[in-house]
Amino acid sequence: MQSTPPLSFLDGLLDRLATSVKPPEWLVDEVQHRAVLLLNHVLMQEPEAQARLVRQQGRTVRVEWRHLSLQLVATPAGLLDRVLPGASARVPDLCLSVQENSPLALAQAALRGDKPPIKIEGDVQLAAEVGWLVDHVRWDLEEDLSRLIGDAPAHTLGQTARRAAAALREFIARRSPVTDGKFTGKSTE
């Protein structure tokens, strides 16, 4: 007997919400601003990443998913800044379009440690640098947390979060059948 995964109804609900409800511009602007601040915080902890971005200064990358997009430019400091809509009519040097439309499928892939399918158009060297950043730069959340609450509590929270994430990955792996890297939406349990 085939059954559907326990949270499969969320996929259709999230799809309908994402297509019918457009967030206000001020919210999109603020979320993008905060995302760039977080990216720069993480980049500042990795000198090699900054050095790679310095070599790409002035080059732009546009990231797209559904109707949302964010265009970034590498700064002379080896960080990132937003290219505001309308500020420059310049075509981006690299365009990365996330091909998976389902927010739930993206979340499931992230929990499994998979990268989403991405359509890449533009400069090959810049794409290689962005690929290196994605593969090698990680946010050391535990280190940042230790500055706020101390080493021991931060380490304990980090261990707890890693255990919870591993348990969630295991749960998803048991409940979500995967065929050729794609979620089938059907369970054989």
Image (cartoon, rainbow, N blue to C red):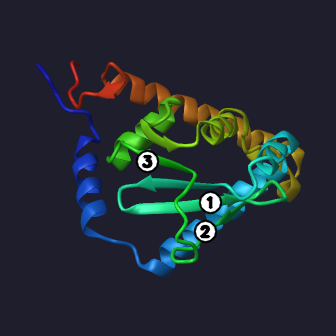
- Residue 98: x and y, percent? 42, 45
Q: Is residue 141 left or right of residue 184?
A: right
The residues tagged by marks 1 and 3 sit, at their Cα atoms, a distance apart of 14 Å
- Residue 176: x and y, percent? 33, 27
Where is residue 20, by image quadrant? bottom left
Residue furthest out toward the left? 1
Q: Which residue is mark 1?
A: 72
Are circles 1 and 2 on residues that touch, CB within 8 Å?
yes
Q: Is residue 22 left or right of residue 186?
A: right
Toward the viewer: 150 or 57? 57
Quadrant where the N terminus is found in the figure: top left
Q: Which residue is mark 3?
A: 97
Label 2 Cα neighbours within 10 Å, binned few <14 / some 14-19 / many ≥20: some
Q: Is residue 160 left or right of residue 15?
A: right
Q: Determine which of the numbered discs, if any, sits on residue 173 in the image.
A: none
Residue shown at the point (54%, 74%) measured from the top left: 29
Query: What amino acid is labelled 1 in the image?
Result: Leu
Say which label, 1 or 2, has the lower sequence index. 1
Q: Which residue is mark 2?
A: 83
